[in-house]
Image (cartoon, grey):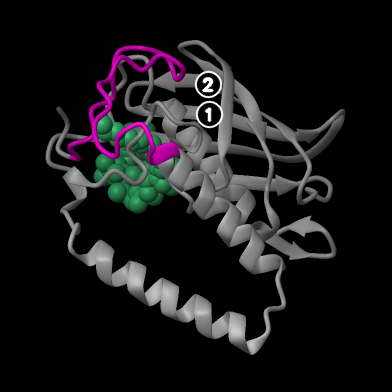
Amino acid sequence: MPRTGLPSGSGTWLDPDIPVTGGGPGYGAVVESLRDLLDGFAAASPDEETVRALADAFAAWSKRLERHRVGERQQVFGRRRDLHGRGQVMAPKFAAEESDERSVKGTVTFGRYFLGGNGAVHGGAIPLLFDEVMGRLSNTAGRSQSRTAFLHTDFRSVTPVGVPLSVRAWFESEEGRKRFIRAEIRDGDTLCAESHGLFLALLPGQP
Ligand SMILES: CCCCCCCCCCCCCCCC(=O)SCCNC(=O)CCNC(=O)[C@H](O)C(C)(C)COP(=O)(O)OP(=O)(O)OC[C@H]1O[C@@H](n2cnc3c(N)ncnc32)[C@H](O)[C@@H]1OP(=O)(O)O
C-alpha cells in the first residue's frame, strides 16, 4: 500500500476490486440527504424561526458526531468507492456509467449549492469536478496513487445548474510517473468546459 494509505485497486472505476468498509448500507442515503440539504439551504430565504431551528439542529448533530470522530484512515466520508460521488459532498456527485482501464464516462448534475450566478455553475466548482474525476481515473486499474501537478480548465460555454450533463475523462498518455489526462463536460452537444491535467505517481515517502 502506498504511504497515503489509499489502496488503488486492480480493477476499473466501476469495478475497483477494493473492499468497502464503514458506514453500513444506509450511508449512501445519508450523503444524498446531505446534498439535498445543501441545495435546499442554498435555494432558501428562511425566516428567523427557521434559522433558529436550523442552528439548534446543526449544533446538536455536530455535538453527537463529535463522539464518533476518527482519524483520516478510518473516516468513511469520501472513501466509499461503491457509491456515486464516493460518499462525499465537497464535489458534485459524478455517476460513472462506463469505464475501462483508460477512461470513464458518466453524468453530473450541479445542484443549487454549486451556483455561481445567473444559472451558471461557479467557476471553481468545475475544476473541482475535473480534479475529482481525472484524479480518481489516474489511480484506477492497478496504478499507484498520484497527485495533481497541474490542472488546466477552459470554460467554453456556460455550465447550467440543475441540468444532467455528460462527463468524459480519458488518458492521453502515460510516460513513467507522468499521467496526462483530458476531460470534458457537455450539455447535450454543447461543450461547456474541458480540461487537461498532469497527475504524477507518488514516490515512496511522498505524502
Ligand atoms: C478504502 C479506501 C478508499 C479511498 C478512496 C479514495 C479515492 C480517491 C479519489 C481521489 C479523487 C480526487 C483526486 C484529487 C487529487 C488531488 O487533488 S491531489 C492534491 C493537489 N495536488 C497536490 O497537492 C500536489 C502538490 N505537489 C506535490 O506534492 C509535488 O509537486 C508532486 C506533484 C508530488 C511532484 O513532486 P516531485 O515528485 O518532486 O516531482 P518533480 O521531480 O518535481 O517532477 C517530476 C516530473 O514532473 C514534472 N512536473 C512536476 N510538476 C509539474 C507541473 N506543475 N507542470 C509540468 N510538469 C511538472 C517535472 O518537470 C518532472 O519532469 P521530468 O524532469 O521528469 O521530465
Q: In this rendering, does residue 21 appear at all? A: yes
Residue 129 magenta-drawn? no
- Whether residue 88 sits left or right of residue 128 in the image: it is left
Quarter assignment of residue 79: top left
Q: Name the residue under label 1.
A: 181
Location of the N terminus by quadrant is top left
Alpha carbon of mark 2 to alpha carbon of mark 1: how far?
Answer: 4 Å
* Secondary structure of the residue carrying numbered label 2: strand
Q: Of 139 and 69, which appears nearest the observer? A: 69
Q: How crowded is mark 1: few (under 14 residues within 10 Å), some or many (20 or more)?
A: many
Range shown magenta: 4-28
Return the mark for residue 17: none
Q: Can residue 146 be seen in this view?
A: no
**Residue visible at 30% across and 34% down in the picture:** 24
Decide which of 102, 110 is in the foreground and name it. 110
Q: Position of residue 17 (x, y in %)?
A: 31, 14
Tell me the quarter of the picture where residue 146 sits.
Answer: top left
Q: What element carries label 1?
A: strand
The reply to whether callout 2 and callout 1 are in contact (CB within 8 Å) is yes
What residue type is disc 1 on?
Ile
- Looking at marks 2 and 1 on the same chain, the residue that comes earlier in the sequence is marked by 2
Most common SS among magenta residues:
loop
Q: Write down the residue under mark 2.
A: 171
Q: Which residue is drawn at 43% across and 80% down?
A: 56
The residue sitting at 33% across, 21% down in the picture is: 176
Residue 136 quadrant:
top left
Which image quarter has ligand 1? Answer: top left
